[in-house]
Image (cartoon, rainbow, N blue to C red):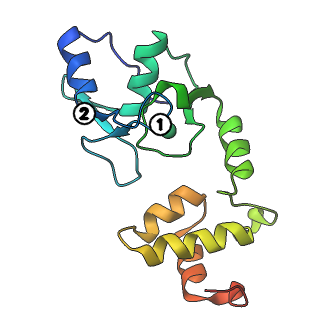
Amino acid sequence: MAKRIPKLHLTQINRFWAQVDRSGGPDACWLWTGFVRPNGYGNFGVNYKEYKAHRVSYFLEHGRIDNDTLILHHCDVRSCVNPAHLFQGTPKDNSQDAVRKGRNTRLFGEQNGKAKLTRVAVLKIRRLYKAGGVFQRTLAKQFGVSEATISYVISGGRWKKLPP
Ligand SMILES: [Zn+2]
């Protein structure tokens, strides 16, 4: 379960917004300019604890986050903290959201440890990996499969008939 965000003092709130690029206007993604974790989420430290920046943003906007809920992105940009792009959801909502956006992932046969990826996901993984700067481990996490599957996808394997 995600950490509960404490009530923030004004100086902490100001420090939060000082790390956000809002230059694109109210409808744009507001990108976190502070530390971004390897998984793509912005990181905000309060009293020696680390919180996901987009969760803090949602918390500041709404004053609360229900227990056991995730804060999800409409825009699919993990480092975005624009409250207008965020919504509260369950882990189930998250996987449905992922499927709808083509980020996912598992079709059938998961039980035998061979999670399958959609064609769209395979192409996306290859594109992301080719662009550089991303670990196979990170991709595995993002797409909900094993590192071995990611490695297999990148090297060709079962999906080699797809365009590179
Ligand atoms: Zn956004």
Give the residue pinned by disc 1.
28
Residue in front for this viewpoint, 147 or 18 = 18
Q: Position of residue 28 (x, y in %)?
A: 47, 37
Q: Does residue 109 lie above or below 53 as drawn?
A: below
Give the residue pinned by disc 2.
19
- Residue 53 occupies quadrant: top left
Query: In the image, what residue occupies the spot 19% across and 28% down?
Result: 48
Residue in front for this viewpoint, 84 or 23 = 23
Count all numbered tags in the image, as a single digit.
2
Q: Position of residue 22 (x, y in %)?
A: 35, 32
Q: In which quarter of the image is the C terminus?
A: bottom right
Query: In the image, what residue occupies the spot 57% across and 24% down?
Result: 68
Q: Which amino acid does label 1 sit on?
A: Ala
Q: How crowded is mark 1: few (under 14 residues within 10 Å), some or many (20 or more)?
A: some
Q: Which amino acid does label 2 sit on?
A: Gln
Residue in front for this viewpoint, 115 or 9 = 9
Residue in front for this viewpoint, 91 or 77 = 77
Residue 3 appears anywhere in the view:
no
Left or right, residue 131 beside residue 115 = left
Query: In the image, what residue occupies the spot 80% across and 66% down?
Result: 109
Q: Does the closest atom of ligand 1 sit within 8 Å of the Cβ of label 2? A: no
Q: Does the closest atom of ligand 1 sit within 8 Å of the Cβ of label 1? A: yes
Q: Residues within 10 Å of mark 2 (few under 14, many from 20)?
A: some
Q: Position of residue 112 (x, y in %)?
A: 75, 68
Q: Where is residue 69 in the image (x, y as percent from the top left)?
A: 58, 26
- Residue 20 occupies quadrant: top left
For label 1, the SS is loop
* Label number found at residue 80: none
